[in-house]
Amino acid sequence: MGLRPVALAAVLAVATIMTTAASADPILGTWQVEPDHKGQVGQVVIRRCGDSFCGRVMKVHDSTGTSVVTRSMGRDLFWGLKARGQGNYDGGRVWVPLYDRVYDAKARLSGNRLRVFGCLGPLCDGQTWRRLR
C-alpha cells in the first residue's frame, strides 16, 4: 500500500519548503571586511559548502579604492562553519593571512553585521564585517 497522491504531494511540499528555508540562511551573501594593517579592504562571498559555510575573498582594494591583487584573492578565508541557531556559527576554521595561520572559527550574525572570530583555545580575536549584498 503506497502513499495517497495527496499525502505524497504534501510530504514533497514540506520537503521543498524546508530545503528552501535552509538554503536561504542569513549568513549567505557578500561582506566587506575591516581594513587590514595596510589599509586594504576585502570583499568575502559566503556560500554553502556541503552542510556548512565557506567564505572566499573575491575582491580587494586599497585605501583609495583602487583594486589590488593579493595572495588572499580567490582563497577561502574560512570553511566548515555551521549554523547553531540565533545567529551563531561555529565548528569551522579560519585562515588569517597576516600570520598565515589557521585557527578555529566562529561567527555571530546581528542584522547586517557579522562578527567573525579566530580562536586559539579559549582566546579569540575577530573582526566585524558589514553586509554589502
Image: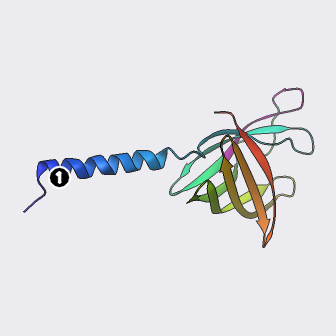
User: Is residue 77 or residue 131 the one in the foreground?
Assistant: 131
Query: Which segment did they paint magenta?
Result: 56-67
Identify whether 91 is placed above or below 18: below
Query: Residue 15's x, y, as percent?
Result: 32, 51
Query: Residue 110's x, y, as percent?
Result: 67, 47
Identify whether 35 is placed above or below 123: above
User: Is residue 57 or residue 90 the one in the foreground?
Assistant: 90
Going 68% across and 33% down the picture, which residue do you hit?
132
Report whether 83 appears left or right of 127: left
Displayed quadrant of residue 118: bottom right
Report whether 19 appears left or right of 130: left
Query: Residue 58's x, y, as percent?
Result: 70, 38
Q: Residue furthest bottom?
A: 121
Going 58% across and 43% down the picture, which residue do you hit?
28
**Identity of the amino acid at label 1?**
Ala
Displayed quadrant of residue 63: top right
**Which secondary structure, mark 1?**
helix
- Judge whether residue 60 is colored magenta: yes
- Judge whether residue 9 is colored magenta: no
What crowding class fits label 1: few (fewer than 14 Cα within 10 Å), some (14-19), or many (20 or more)? few
Identify whether 7 is placed above or below 129: below
Q: Which residue is mark 1?
A: 7
Query: Residue 123's x, y, as percent?
Result: 82, 68
